[in-house]
Each structure stands twice: as structure tokens, then as C-alpha cells.
Amino acid sequence: MKDFRLYAITGEEFHKGRDLIQVMEEAILGGVDIIQLRDKYSSKKEVLRKAKLLKELAKKYDIPLIINDHIDVALAVDADGIHIGQDDLPLEEARKIIGKNKIIGISTHEIEEAREAQKNGADYIGVGPIFPTKSKVDVVDPVTTKYIEEVVKEITIPFVAIGGIKLHNVDQVLDAGATRICAISEIVGNEDVTRVCQLFIKKIDERLLIK
Ligand SMILES: Cc1ncc(COP(=O)(O)OP(=O)(O)O)c(N)n1
Ligand SMILES: Cc1nc(C(=O)O)sc1CCOP(=O)(O)O
Ligand SMILES: [Mg+2]
């Protein structure tokens, strides 16, 4: 998969009264280079409707659209990939359904899960939650930046840090070795979505230059 720096996940509960597509477009204009549709509340029909609109948006800017959880929706809209969790469809089964040319990302919360994901052919892993987050119910305890350090040492596929990442704490995440950042609330819940993304990108790029 093409590399990325800033991954934005939808979270409509954080921008009530603002249009989903407009908010995500503002994020892309700020430098987001991969987007995910994550909707834990809507009907499948509604998720499909949003996925179609986001697919158009992603195509306009030539960036990948990932669908969280719903592999059927991903196939229906020809999304670029899916994101699955430890309790979702196993990676090997998901791969059989979605095919080898699509992206599969998988959440990991400990190094054994990261090893397993790499062995089973994940295209990227989510590494988190780094900090406490209110954006996910039944979330595991924060894994802290220690887990990033472990992943950096051992895992060779791309990883993205997620969970409670804000402008004020992203330096700790980058210091630990992350080069890709994922956020929901700090991006889509911001008054100036484009600006917060620009500031994230600036911080990521400063670190990449030093490396
Ligand atoms: C990039 C990224 N990382 C982690 C997750 C979380 O996925 P999952 O554990 O399946 O939890 P839900 O998002 O389904 O609540 C993600 N979506 N994206
Ligand atoms: C969806 C999700 N997955 C996580 C994981 O660790 O797997 S943390 C998380 C929520 C991220 O939202 P925010 O940026 O608002 O904290
Ligand atoms: Mg899931």
C-alpha cells in the first residue's frame, strides 16, 4: 500500500450539525492522506450510503477509503480496504473475501497480536489505545508509548498509532517512533478541522526530517 502520515476516522458524534463529507474534505485539505468510515450506530443501508459518498470524496483526492467492520459494504462500494479488530472476522477469512489487492488493517494491543497480524498478511496494524479515549466503548486499557517502542523494534509492516492522540500529546507518540498518526475526536471534533490536520502534519514531518 502507498505510505501515509495522517489517518482520519469518521466520528459524527463529535461534529453534530456539520456535514460528514464536508468535515472529511476539510481534513483531507489539511493533509489527511487516508480515511476510514467508522459508524457503530447506523443501519447497514445508511452505512452504505455514507460509504458511497466517502468513496467519491476519496477518489476526488486520490486517497484510500477504508471501511471499518463491514466487509460487505467495502466490497459494495469498491473501497480500498477494510479495518478489522481482534474480535472481528479473522484476517485469513477477510483476505479470502476481499482479495489480495485490497488493504487490510487490523487493531493490535500487544506485541503478540502484532506478530500474528504480520504473519497473517495484514497491510498495516493499528497500535493502541496509546492514551485513554472516549471514542470507543469497551476499549482496553491504554497500552502507552511503550508498546510503540516494542513495535518499532520488531515489526516490519506499517503501523499507525491510535487512541487519545491530540496535538498536545502527539510529540510523545512521535518520540516513541511512530511515523503515522490516527485520530477521531481531535480531528473531526475540532472547530478548525483543516488547521488541526496541518499542525499534525507539521509535527510528523519535522520528525521525519530529523530521522
Ligand atoms: C486504524 C484503526 N485502528 C484501530 C481501530 C479499532 O478497530 P476495532 O478494534 O475493530 O474497534 P472498532 O473501531 O470496530 O470499534 C480502527 N477502527 N482503526
Ligand atoms: C477506534 C479506536 N480504536 C482504538 C484502538 O486502540 O484500537 S482507539 C480508538 C478511538 C480513537 O479515537 P480518538 O482519536 O478520539 O481517541
Ligand atoms: Mg471493529
Image: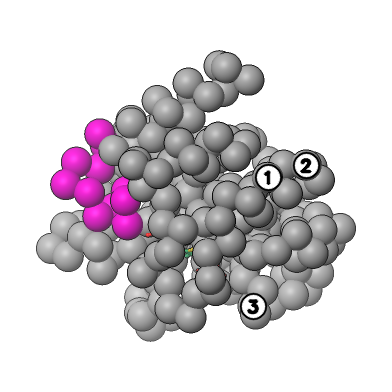
Does ligand 3 reach within 8 Å of label 3's beta carbon?
A: yes
The span picked out in magenta is 185-195
- Label 3 with label 2: CB-CB less than 8 Å: no
* Circle on res. 149: 1
| Amino acid type, residue under disc 3 in the picture | Asp
Quadrant assignment for the C terminus: top right
Residue at far right of view: 119
For residue 31, which quarter of the picture? top left
| Amino acid type, residue under disc 2 in the picture | Lys
Q: Residue at x 74, y 75 (%)?
A: 90
Q: Residue at x 70, y 63 (%)?
A: 110
Q: Residue at x 62, y 71 (%)?
A: 85
Q: Is residue 188 magenta?
A: yes
Q: Which residue is mark 3?
A: 88
Task: Classify mark 3: helix, strand or loop.
Answer: loop
Quadrant assignment for the N terminus: top right
